[in-house]
Image (cartoon, rainbow, N blue to C red):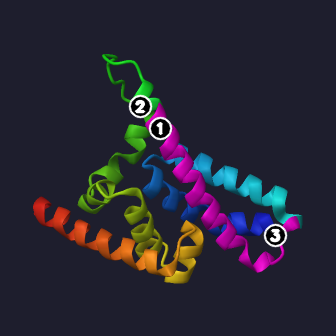
Amino acid sequence: MAVTALYSAHYRSLVRLAVLLVRDVASAEEVVQDAFVALHGAWRRLRDTDKALAYLRQSVVNRSRSVLRHRAVVEKYAPKGLPDAPSAENGAIGELERSAVIEALRGLPNRQREALVLRYYGDLSEAEIAHAMGISKGAVKSHTARGMAALRMALEQFS
């Protein structure tokens, strides 16, 4: 029952977070679904059920990283010379890609993008971001500052 309540309250925001990290809606939805399935399976083992949302966020971030790693391997070993075919995902995220901010975010290194998305989109504190990303608060500050500087430079080039 508690997992259902979390799902109803946070599914959409977690999908939006995952879309910003993995860059496509279908993969983002799959990442979030997998995170909820894992939470449901681990519910009895959770020591503090009040931290279930933090567990979900961390799970979404970690699973998004896995998707990106898998994509990198697939792209590395994909046969060359095959024509690109437009996919349904392209149409679904077409609106997101028109945004200069989203484009600029895409150019950032993964950790900087994750820190910025969690901070300014997810509205998480430095401590929550550190927990979700599995790094120290100092590293969060560093990734956020570097990401903001790179984002400013990229957005100045667009205008």
Instruction: Give coordinates of residue 144: x percent, y percent.
Output: 37, 74
Magenta stretch encompasses residue 46: yes
Residue that numbered label 1 is attached to: 71
Residue at 48% x, 45% y: name it: 68
The disc, 3 or 1, on the residue closer to the chain's N-terminal end is 3
Q: Is residue 105 left or right of residue 56?
A: left
Q: Circle 3 is placed at which residue position? A: 2
> Would you say the residues marked 1 and 2 are in contact, meaning their CB atoms lie under 8 Å apart?
yes
Q: Amino acid at mark 1?
A: Arg
**Residue 27 got which mark?**
none
Q: Position of residue 98 (x, y in %)?
A: 26, 52
> Dot 3: what SS?
helix
Give the CA distance from mark 3 to mark 2: 39 Å
- From mark 1 to mark 2, how far is it between C-alphas? 6 Å
- Distance, label 3 to label 1, CA atoms, is 33 Å
> Residue at left 24%, top 72%?
149
Residue at point 53% right, 71% down? 135
Residue range corresponding to the magenta coloring: 45-73
Look at mark 2 in the image and give the residue it sits on.
75
Confirm or deny contact between disc 3 and disc 2 (CB under 8 A): no
The kind of residue on which mark 2 rests is Glu
The percent coordinates of residue 124 (x first, y second) are 51, 79
| Residue 53 forms part of the magenta stretch | yes
What residue type is disc 3 on?
Answer: Ala
Q: Quadrant of the N terminus?
A: bottom right
